Image (cartoon, rainbow, N blue to C red):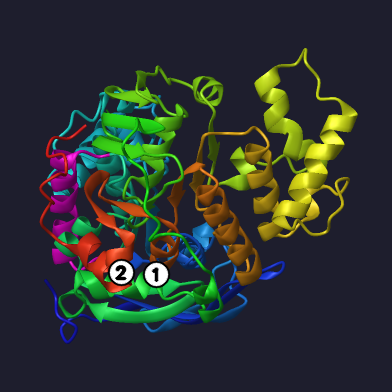
Amino acid sequence: MSTAKEARAIVEMRGITIEFPGVKALDGVDLTLRGGEVHTLMGENGAGKSTLIKALTGVYAIDGGSIIVEGTPREFRGTADAQLAGISTVYQEVNLCTNLSVGENVMLGHEVRGPLGINWAATHREAARHLENLGVRLDTRSMLSAHSIAVQQLVAISRAMVTDSRVLVLDEPTSSLDRGEVDQLFGVIRGLRDRGVAILFVTHFLDQVYEISDRLTVLRNGTLVGEYPVEDLPRGQLISKMIGRELDELDAISQSAARAIDRTSDPVIRATGVGRRGVLHPADVEVYDGEVVGLAGLLGSGRTELVRLLYGADRADAGRVEVRGRTARITNPRHAIDRRIAFSSEDRRAEGLVGDLTVAENIVLGIQAKRGALRKVRKSEQDTIVEEYIQALGVRPANPNALVRNLSGGNQQKVLLARWLATAPQLIILDEPTRGIDVGAKADIQRKVAELSEQGLAVVFISSELEEVIRIAQRIVVMRDRRKIGELTSHDIGVDDLVAFIADEQPQPDSPESAA
């Protein structure tokens, strides 16, 4: 690995500020990329990672700050400007033409030309040479569609390096790869690093961060937390810097995490060995009446993947699910709803609310879906239900005819919660219900979850904010790298304990050892 003294700065981003309507996405962020280093960009959802990458690659114009490449100030008006400056990007979703050959993809836009047009034989020879430079041997005339995602990633990297890029941005390149494919990719990355390329690496897999990185930059809420040589930032400290601490106002909320839960009868739901190949290692989870089970772990740890399998939003290919002691076939959300299981997605705009409908229409949508198109919710019944939940959750403005898209994020989240509570579930799964909302709305939702659990509702609660999970849950299922690594009792631990558990390099005894 390169040291800080040896490495020269290729890119310096200073005081980068980007504002969108009503939102400051980046606020004075610095980033330095050095030749011969793998520099990993870390932060949870909303930290500003994607925005910073798009500023570097010319997708977004910056509102403040400067970008200096090899000592020269640059202004990127588009991605072509960034590419001319020697900055290339390979995204998680490979941007290639699967209907073309490997060689055609590698050399696209840079084909070897002769007096009669493209010289295809020479073009394929050049493609093979560029692949060989990465240690990759492929039949350049084979169709790209015939190769795995891992091979397509390598082809995309080779294509990026045809122009001798000095900076290579790799955005979640390992998200769809197995261990062997990751090893192959990392071999290519190390080779490029040793040739002096500056590599910006983005991943949510903590183990991979420490396997491949020379240096880390941590962002939180659009601001720079700091830049660190990887050897100077242990895992526990990295996680603490990523998640930060909650505001003091939330500490006053009374919570029922220490309340005893009756586990003598069958749980509301029991999942045994539930998993999906390439998505989640087999995991066991059970939730009892009146219990809040928190799912904790970094983004990409498998939290959302697990609950989507429980709800049937994604189909498991391993394991068994029981609802109140009886085997249940839950292969789609309809099956879950029929068993009074509700799921509030973390993406409330794309998978939850309908912005062009009113507050009232959004709240009764779940009831109407449960009853079917032929059994309409009567207007009087709708008015009663809507009024009850607007008051219970403190939706503001308290106008059932207001369009949901005009509400604040916190009030939108309350409307989504109201929709599922109106269906009278026995289990509700809440995926990041307080993300991106203000402290007051966050406190309202936390209080409501505690109140509902005391009334007997079973809850699965996901949050990136570990203090919130500890405050609300009786038990915490801890996830890392798409596997369950253990369980903790919340009233016995603090945030530092949970951070240390997540960061522990050794798998816990009850974690599944075989890949899904």
Front position in the image: 355 or 117:
355
Q: Residue at x 75, y 34 (%)?
A: 364
Q: Quadrant of residue 504?
A: bottom left
Q: Amino acid at mark 2?
A: Ile
As drawn, is 510 to the left or to the right of 146? left
Question: Which residue is labeled 2 in the image?
Answer: 239
Relative to residue 335, is residue 489 depicted above or below? below
Q: Residue at x 86, y 25 (%)?
A: 378
The stretch in magenta equals 177-200
The answer to the question of whether label 1 and label 2 lie on touching residues, with beta carbons closer than 8 A, is yes
| Residue 376 forms part of the magenta stretch | no
Front position in the image: 413 or 6:
413
| Residue 178 forms part of the magenta stretch | yes
Q: Which quadrant does the C terminus fall into?
A: top left
As drawn, is 111 to the left or to the right of 514? right
Question: Which residue is labeled 1 in the image?
Answer: 243
Q: CA distance from mark 1 to mark 2?
A: 6 Å
As drawn, is 255 to the left or to the right of 32? right
Q: Which quadrant does the N terminus fall into?
A: bottom left
In x, y percent, where is residue 45? 46, 59
Relative to residue 475, is residue 367 depicted above or below? above
Q: Residues within 10 Å of mark 1 (few under 14, many from 20)?
A: many
